[in-house]
Image (cartoon, rainbow, N blue to C red):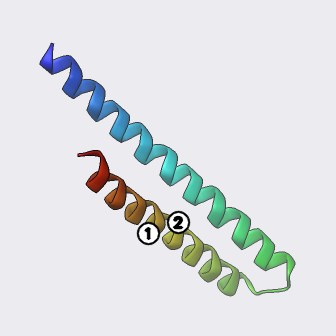
């Protein structure tokens, strides 16, 4: 019984992490595309996309840290 709970917990954590990374990649792609449409060069658009990816991952980590304090 306890092993099933642990496996389920690990699966939920891994799926949440995967969804977060996919969401960050989508935000980065949208940011890069919009920057390129705005006339930015490819390196500049890539830097903006990387900044957006890092921002989403940082925000998700901060939210996870806050939620961990309240849920445990």
* Residue at x-position 42% and y-position 37%: 15
Q: Please, what secondary structure does the residue beneath circle 2 have?
A: helix
> Residue 11 appears at what percent x and percent y?
33, 31
Tell me if residue 57 comes above or below residue 45 in the rendering.
above
Name the residue carrying label 1.
58
* Rendered residue at 52%/72% (across/down): 55
Give the number of the disc on residue 28: none
Say which residue appears at 64% left-offset and 56% top-offset: 26
Question: Given the current orientation, which residue lies at the most extreme front position?
Answer: 70
**On screen, 22 above or below 31?**
above
Q: Where is residue 14 in the image (x, y as percent from the top left)?
A: 36, 40
Q: Nearer the viewer, residue 36 or 55?
A: 55
Q: Tell me: 19 left or right of 5.
A: right
Q: Kindly identify which residue carries mark 2.
A: 56
For the residue pair 8 and 48, the one nearer the viewer reads as 8
Going by the image, does 28 lie left or right of 8? right
Q: Which of 71 and 52 is in front in this view?
A: 71
In the rendered image, residue 1, in percent from the top left (x then y), is placed at: 15, 12
Residue placed at 64% from the left, 80% from the top? Answer: 48
Q: What element carries label 1?
A: helix
Question: In terms of image quadrants, where is residue 7?
Answer: top left
> Among all residues in the image, which is located at the extreme top?
1
Residues tagged 2 and 1 counted as in contact (Cβ below 8 A): yes
Neighbor class of circle 2 (other Cα within 10 Å; few <14, some 14-19, many 20+) is some
């Amino acid at each position: 019984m306890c092993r099933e709970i642990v496996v389920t917990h690990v699966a939920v954590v891994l799926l949440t992490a995967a969804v977060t990374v996919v969401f960050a990649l989508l935000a980065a792609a949208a940011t890069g595309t919009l920057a390129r449409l705005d006339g930015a060069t490819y390196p500049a658009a890539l830097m903006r996309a990387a900044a957006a990816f890092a921002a989403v991952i940082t925000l998700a980590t901060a939210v996870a840290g806050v939620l961990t304090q309240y849920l445990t």
